[in-house]
Each structure stands twice: as structure tokens, then as C-alpha cells.
């Protein structure tokens, strides 16, 4: 299993998805060697071996290579590859591992591991399954993105024995944008199981928001990287209309990214800075991150392009109702929520105002959403993946 | 002893609320004027139902009245549907009129706006019943002597009210937990009444046609006229009450299920037994003495396995929506602004609350009920924005809320 991050060392939802996926795969008897590009203590993941490909520390890696997630190269340069050094080291490590160990399947998550996966396939002759959590098209906000990244993705899709996409929408992008045949792609939706790494204490870290809420304020949360893919400028413009109707509303933005300054500037231009709080990056397993969901009255995922989107499920696990863009993969599995087209700022405002105004709407979205969350499990996706494994194992054996 | 088939068909279409946003509040009041190409577009839905159901079904019923002098039946038509039919070029109202002129088709009374007002505002309820009676008198020259409440929502209190207003008969669901060992196939009397009669829907036989007719997984499929008549003849009692939506024919059960052929053949087959006949609701009620009193202190409807109002008022969104609307009642009627009052009344139509039902909106079961909205939540949002629009109009008139 070739991945790039695992909780608690992760930037996006991909790490969480990989961890939960592996845990569920392991429980069906799959033996997993997980390769990760940095060195950290993963002794808490007792169901698989985690192999560090380098001695680099996660925070150093993340700090130096943050743009691997943001695709900010898409309009400036197509000549450079983000995180190239680490990717090369990662590939070398995987080659060594191939020479050492015995394994049956290579399962690679997203483009950063594709080159390592391809070379492992070439060396060993074992089937390669590529798992697509996001494409460059998504990261660039439904645009072309970085050409070199796209070429690596294309090669991975072409040469893989099987492709697993996290949603129908992602499958369609792989077909339309990369010209891959539909028959080669399976869909395995993500699921989410709340996994407390540390116990929450009763107090919320947001003392100020607690105080405001006692005075009738409500909190709208978005949590994710501040990058074009996430559609946050649409949310900010909708916020202006929401605040005009519901002045006691705070918009809480959790996350960092290349749009940080742009969003601050936009909130000032719209004259709503008083109602906007930018929290910056929070570790996705710590208490401040989870307190953001707990204190929120409604969570919004306004993404322009979101292959899956785990955060709405995480919000529901804290009984916070959610509004998601129709362009997100999670909208294929979640019904008890409100859905909007990402560009329809008026409709987003309309729905936000209704949730903040009418308590029964908020409570029913929360109750029914939580109930639905219990039915969104890994079971079916694990079946799809195991079936793909078996099919290619049979094909490989004489 | 003779036995009567009492066929009663209910015609209704709501005025569905368009995608009405917070940005329309205080600006627009065209709640029911969707021009979209989805099912919130009332004209579009009506055109489809006229073509698929109303027009062909009325033709079949007209032919049956001509072919069989013994054939008679009852129907009801809501005011919200009559208005929509009057505003389009269809031949439906003339066709209805020619049926009523045979004097073998009875029109049943109800609330004009197909509302649940009886449970919220007695005075408003009477107004809507009178509006409907006047409309029926004006269009067809008859005054209803039989009454049915919206969704067949019935209790003892409603029966007492109907008797006090001179109705001869009232309709309700023939629900087993109420009837116990008794059969719905007799004429009954509500408690503490003298003149009014109670006719109860034989839901098994009615739903064999209305719900199960085209269901290939049903053990009774295919339902032939032979089979149906053998079931109807096998029962006890003096009257088989077949109550259903008019839209059963061609809309709920599509033409390709054979539903029109079934309807065409049904009267001839039923009349083959010499002692069988047809009756309208009022004729049936006056032809037999009641065999027993049926006590229904709690409200019973014709919907779902629960047979209660939970499909309309079962969740917090539905309750907030309807309570908010009726709380505006006094302020609205005091304005004497006919357009404002009429919009308020059209928002009372029970369908608006039904669209907010979450009972069936579960995994893989999203399309188990009919709604023009993608989710019950969207139905609620459009409704509440319309409600706030009514408030905005009141405030503009200087009304203190």
C-alpha cells in the first residue's frame, strides 16, 4: 500500500480515508505493508506495518511541500513538479522494498505514489491498483492544472491494472479528462468513523464563540485547505447576504492555504470582517479541530470540485448539520443534507439563512443526518476493492 | 338483498410553491408561478395529468353512463384544481358538467383549498367549505349533501359539525382497529348524531385498484374484472365502498397497466349479478338504516399504515410550518386584502406539508413518495420563505406582528 499521509500526520482527508480503508481491509484478512514518505511513530496502527521511506519529519515535509495539495502551479509554471525530491526518494525506497519482500498487489494512492507504483509493477510483475482520491483537475478547481502532474496521473491510469475512484464524479473526470475507459474504473465511496485519538474535554477551546453563542450568535463553519478547489470565495460572498438577514452569524474558516490573504481581503471588501474568523491550520485529529465542528451550528462544504469530501461526515458525527456542493462526491451517498451548485451563491445564502432561522430544519438535518451516517459504512467499498484484488490475483497466477 | 357498488373518485391538484428564496421575500409574491421545467411548474403538471388521466378517464366514465343506465358514481374536486382548470383551455370542466347533468353523478363537498383547517381554525374551515359549495353550485348547479374532509381526515367532532350543517352523509376510512369484527360494507352512524350517515372506505378492495393494480410482484396480479368482482361479491354487507384518487386512472396506474380497460369492463361485469347495482354516496346513505354506531374519537385518515395525520404533521418542520401559517390567520383576514387572503389559503393546502414528510426519506427510499422537490428540507425552505413573504406583506400594510 503506497500512501502519502496517515493520521495524526496529515493535511487533508486522504490520510483519514487511507487509515480507515486499511483498517477495514485488514479486518477482512488483507496483510498490509504501508509505505509513507516521512518518519513518525505509528505504533497505534497495530493492524498493519507502516514503513517510512525517508528520515524526514512530517512537519518539515509538509512545511516545504505544502503546494502539493494546492496546485498553485496551474497558472504559473508547468515546468516544475511539487515535492519532487521526496517523490524520488520514495520511489527508490519502494524499489528496495520490492527486492526484499513478497507481496501480491500494489495499491497506490494518488499521483505522488504513482511513479513508485509503476516501477514496483515493472520490477515485480504484480498487478497495480491505483486509488484516486483527487485528480489534478480537481485540485486546479476544474481546470487543467500542472501538466507534469497530469502526465504522471495519465501514465498511472493507463498502466494500472485497475483504477478505484472515490466517487462516480471522480470516475467521470477520469473518463472525460484523461480518456480512460469506464470499464477499467470501480467506484468505492469513502465512509467515516469517528475515531477519537484523544478524549475531548468538556470545555470548548473557542471561549469567545461560546460567549457569543450565549448572546444569540450562531456559527457557520468551513474546514479545509484555503485553495481554489474548495470554493471558499463563493461561501464568503454568500456570507454577506446571510449576515444582512441574520446579523448574529459568525463565519469560522478553519484551514490554511494559498487563498488565505485573498479571503481576508475579500471579507474586508464585502464589509463583513467583523463576522469572519480565520483560524488557520489545525491538526485534523486535535481537540481544536473537533471543537470547531462541535461549536458550529451548520457546516458548509462549498467545493468547486471535491472527489469525495469527508468533512461533512465528520460534522454529522458531531451532530452538526451540513450544506454541501452538488459537485462533491459525498453528495452521492448523503441525502439528509442541503445541496447547492457551488457557483450559486444566492442559493447557498438562501439555505444558510433557512437553517439559521428555522430551528426545526436545523434539528431535523442534524438528527436524520446522524442516523444516515450510521448507514454509510466501508463494507461495500471494501467488497469492491477485495473483489478487484481477487480478480487480478487470479489473472496473475498460472 | 341487493348490493351496491359505491364508487367515489377524488380529483385534486395543489398549487405547488416555486423555488421561492429569501431574496424573493418582500419583493415577489408569485409563490405558485414556477416557469421551470420541473414538477413545481403547475401548468406543466396539469397538462400532463389532463392528457394522461382526466381527459381519457372522463371519456370512459361518460361512455359507461351511456352504456349502463344503472351506472352511477360520486366525485369530488378541490377548489384549487377547479381554478387551475378554469385558467387553462382544457375541456375538463365541460366534460364534468355533462356528467353531472345525467343526475347520476354526485359531487361531494370538501374544503375549497384542500386544507387541514378543521384541526386549526374552525371559522376558517367553515369559510372554505362554503367557498367550495358556492363554487360547485355555480359550476354544476348542485349543492353537496355528502362531505369528505381533506385526506379523509375524520373524527366524531367532524361528524357532529357536518350533521349540524345539514349534510346527510360523511366519509371516512374503514380502518380495522376501529371497526374490529365489523365490516366496512354497511351504512353506519357516528355517535351522538341522528340524521347523518357514515360510509367507510373498503380499503382492501379500493387499494387493489388504486395501489396494487399494476404491481407485478403482487400475488393478485394481473387483476382482471372477473377476479375483482368475485372478491367484491364474496364479501358481506349492503355496499362496497370504493374510494380512491381520480388520478388512479392513467396517472398512478399508467395506461399500459390496462387500468382503462379494467374501468370500462367493471360495471358490466358487476351488473351481471342481478341483485347488484350502483349507488351514489347520498343515495346509498338514504337507502339503508344504519346497522351500528362507529365511534372515532381520534382522527383517522386514509394515508399510510398508521392512518393518522403523521404524513402531514408528523415532524417538527411540518408542525412549525402549519402553526406559523395559522398564527397569521387573524391578521391576514383582517386586512380584507383578497389577494393576500387567497395566497394564505393556497398555502394551507395539505400537499405542502406532505412534501416535508421525512418518514420515507431514508436510504435508497428517496423516491418512495411523490414530491416536486428534491428533499423534504427544500419543501420546507420554500414554504417558510413564502410564509415570511406573507409577513412582509402584512408589515408593509402597517400591521403589527
Image (cartoon, coloured by chain):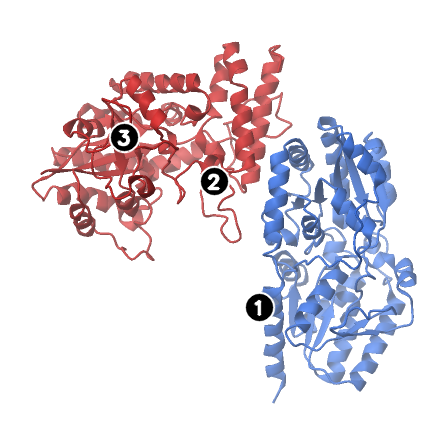
Q: Height in image: A350 above or below A73?
A: above
Judge left or right: residue A163 versus residue B128: right
Q: Secondary structure at mark 2?
A: loop
Image depth: mark 1 or mark 3 in front: 3
Can residue B312 be seen? yes
Residue B385: give x, y in percent of width and height: 59, 28
The chain to which mark 1 is attached is A
Q: How many marks?
A: 3
Tell me if label 1 and label 3 are in contact, CB under 8 Å. no
Judge left or right: residue B343 versus residue A273: left
Q: Secondary structure at mark 3?
A: strand
Query: In the image, what residue occupies the spot 68% across and 56% down?
Result: A307
Which mark identifies residue B75?
3
The chain to which mark 3 is attached is B
Residue toward you, A282 or A92: A282
Quick one: which chain is blue?
A: A
Q: Which residue is mark 1?
A: A183
Residue A313: give x, y in percent of width and height: 67, 52
Q: Residues within 10 Å of mark 3 (few under 14, many from 20)?
A: many
The chain to which mark 2 is attached is B
Can residue B89 be seen? no
Q: Earlier in the sequence, mark 2 or mark 3?
A: 3
Q: Determine if marks 1 and 2 fall on one subunit.
A: no
Residue B299: give x, y in percent of width and height: 39, 33
Query: In the image, what residue occupies the spot 76% across and 83% down?
Result: A123
Query: In the image, what residue occupies the spot 62% across and 10% down?
Result: B398
Query: Which color was chain B given?
Result: red
Q: Which residue is mark 2?
A: B371
Q: Residues within 10 Å of mark 1 (few under 14, many from 20)?
A: few
Amino acid at each position: 500500500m503506497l500512501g502519502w499521509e496517515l493520521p495524526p500526520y496529515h493535511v487533508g482527508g486522504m490520510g483519514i480515508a487511507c487509515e480507515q480503508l486499511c483498517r477495514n481491509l485488514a479486518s477482512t484478512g488483507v496483510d498490509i505493508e504501508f509505505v509513507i514518505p516521512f518518519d513518525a511513530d505509528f505504533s497505534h496502527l497495530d493492524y498493519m506495518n507502516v514503513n517510512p521511506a525517508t528520515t524526514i519529519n512530517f512537519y518539515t515535509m509538509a512545511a516545504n511541500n505544502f503546494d502539493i495539495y494546492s496546485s498553485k502551479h496551474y497558472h504559473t509554471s508547468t515546468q516544475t513538479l511539487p515535492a519532487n525530491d521526496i517523490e524520488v526518494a520514495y520511489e527508490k525506497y519502494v524499489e528496495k522494498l520490492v527486492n526484499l519482500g513478497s507481496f501480491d498487489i500494489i495499491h497506490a494512492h494518488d499521483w505522488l505514489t504513482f511513479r513508485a507504483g509503476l516501477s514496483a509493477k515493472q520490477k515485480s510483475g504484480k498487478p497495480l491498483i491505483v486509488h484516486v482520491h483527487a485528480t489534478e483537475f480537481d485540485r486546479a478547481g476544474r481546470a487543467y492544472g500542472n501538466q507534469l502532474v497530469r502526465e504522471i496521473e495519465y501514465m498511472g491510469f493507463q498502466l494500472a491494472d485497475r483504477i478505484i475512484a472515490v466517487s462516480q464524479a471522480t470516475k467521470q473526470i477520469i473518463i472525460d479528462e484523461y480518456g480512460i475507459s469506464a470499464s477499467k474504473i470501480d467506484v468505492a465511496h469513502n465512509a467515516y468513523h469517528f475515531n477519537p485519538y484523544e478524549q475531548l474535554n468538556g470545555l470548548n477551546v473557542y471561549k469567545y464563540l461560546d460567549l457569543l453563542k450565549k448572546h444569540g450568535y450562531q456559527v457557520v463553519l468551513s474546514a479545509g485547505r484555503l485553495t481554489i478547489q474548495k470554493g471558499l470565495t463563493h461561501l464568503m460572498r454568500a456570507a454577506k447576504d446571510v449576515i444582512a438577514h441574520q446579523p448574529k452569524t459568525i463565519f469560522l474558516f478553519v484551514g490554511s492555504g494559498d487563498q488565505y490573504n485573498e479571503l481576508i481581503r475579500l471579507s474586508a471588501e464585502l464589509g463583513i470582517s467583523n463576522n469572519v474568523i480565520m483560524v488557520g491550520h489545525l491538526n485534523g485529529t486535535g481537540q481544536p479541530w473537533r471543537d470547531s465542528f462541535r461549536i458550529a451550528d451548520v457546516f458548509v462544504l462549498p467545493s468547486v470540485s471535491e472527489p469525495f469530501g469527508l468533512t461533512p461526515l465528520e460534522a454529522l458525527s458531531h451532530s452538526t448539520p451540513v450544506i454541501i456542493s452538488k459537485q462533491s462526491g459525498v453528495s452521492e451517498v448523503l441525502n439528509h443534507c442541503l445541496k447547492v451548485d457551488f457557483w450559486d451563491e444566492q442559493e447557498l445564502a438562501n439555505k444558510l439563512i433557512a437553517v439559521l432561522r428555522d430551528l426545526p430544519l436545523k434539528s431535523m438535518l442534524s438528527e436524520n443526518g446522524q442516523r444516515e451516517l450510521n448507514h454509510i459504512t466501508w463494507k461495500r467499498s471494501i467488497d469492491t476493492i477485495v473483489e478487484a484484488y481477487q480478480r487480478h490475483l487470479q489473472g496473475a497466477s498460472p | 338483498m341487493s348490493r351496491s357498488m359505491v364508487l367515489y373518485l377524488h380529483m385534486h391538484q395543489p398549487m405547488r410553491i416555486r423555488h421561492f428564496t429569501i431574496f424573493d421575500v418582500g419583493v415577489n409574491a408569485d409563490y405558485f408561478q414556477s416557469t421551470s421545467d420541473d414538477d413545481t411548474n403547475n401548468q406543466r403538471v396539469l397538462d400532463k395529468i389532463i392528457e394522461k388521466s382526466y381527459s381519457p378517464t372522463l371519456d370512459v366514465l361518460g361512455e359507461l353512463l351511456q352504456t349502463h343506465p344503472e351506472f352511477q358514481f360520486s366525485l369530488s374536486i378541490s377548489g384549487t384544481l377547479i381554478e387551475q382548470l378554469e385558467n387553462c383551455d382544457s375541456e375538463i370542466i365541460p366534460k364534468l358538467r355533462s356528467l353531472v347533468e345525467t343526475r347520476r353523478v354526485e359531487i361531494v363537498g370538501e374544503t375549497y383549498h384542500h386544507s387541514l383547517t378543521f384541526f386549526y381554525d374552525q371559522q376558517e374551515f367553515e369559510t372554505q367549505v362554503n367557498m367550495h359549495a358556492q363554487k360547485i353550485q355555480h359550476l354544476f348547479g348542485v349543492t353537496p349533501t355528502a362531505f369528505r374532509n381533506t385526506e379523509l381526515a375524520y373524527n366524531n367532532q367532524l361528524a357532529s359539525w357536518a350533521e349540524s350543517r345539514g349534510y346527510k352523509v360523511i366519509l371516512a376510512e374503514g380502518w380495522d382497529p376501529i371497526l374490529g369484527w365489523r365490516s366496512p360494507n354497511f351504512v353506519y352512524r357516528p355517535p351522538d348524531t341522528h340524521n347523518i350517515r357514515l360510509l367507510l372506505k373498503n380499503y382492501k378492495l379500493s387499494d387493489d385498484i388504486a395501489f396494487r393494480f399494476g404491481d407485478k410482484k403482487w400475488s393478485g396480479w394481473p387483476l382482471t374484472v372477473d377476479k375483482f368482482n368475485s372478491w367484491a361479491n364474496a364479501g358481506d354487507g349492503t355496499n362496497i365502498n370504493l374510494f380512491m384518487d381520480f388520478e388512479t386512472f392513467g396517472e398512478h396506474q399508467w395506461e399500459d397497466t390496462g387500468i382503462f380497460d379494467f374501468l370500462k369492463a367493471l360495471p358490466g361485469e358487476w351488473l351481471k349479478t342481478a341483485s347488484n347495482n350502483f349507488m351514489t354516496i347520498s343515495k346509498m346513505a338514504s337507502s339503508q338504516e344504519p346497522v351500528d354506531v362507529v365511534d372515532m374519537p381520534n382522527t383517522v385518515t386514509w394515508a399510510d399504515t398508521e392512518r393518522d395525520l403523521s404524513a402531514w404533521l408528523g415532524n417538527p418542520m411540518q408542525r412549525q410550518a402549519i402553526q406559523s401559517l395559522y398564527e397569521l390567520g387573524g391578521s391576514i383576514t383582517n386586512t380584507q386584502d383578497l389577494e393576500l387572503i387567497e395566497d394564505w389559503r393556497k398555502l394551507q393546502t395539505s400537499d405542502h406539508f406532505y412534501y416535508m414528510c421525512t418518514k420515507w426519506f431514508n436510504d435508497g427510499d428517496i423516491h418512495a413518495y411523490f414530491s416536486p422537490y428534491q428533499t423534504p428540507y427544500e419543501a420546507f425552505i420554500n414554504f417558510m420563505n413564502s410564509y415570511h413573504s406573507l409577513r412582509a406583506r402584512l408589515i408593509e400594510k402597517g400591521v403589527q406582528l
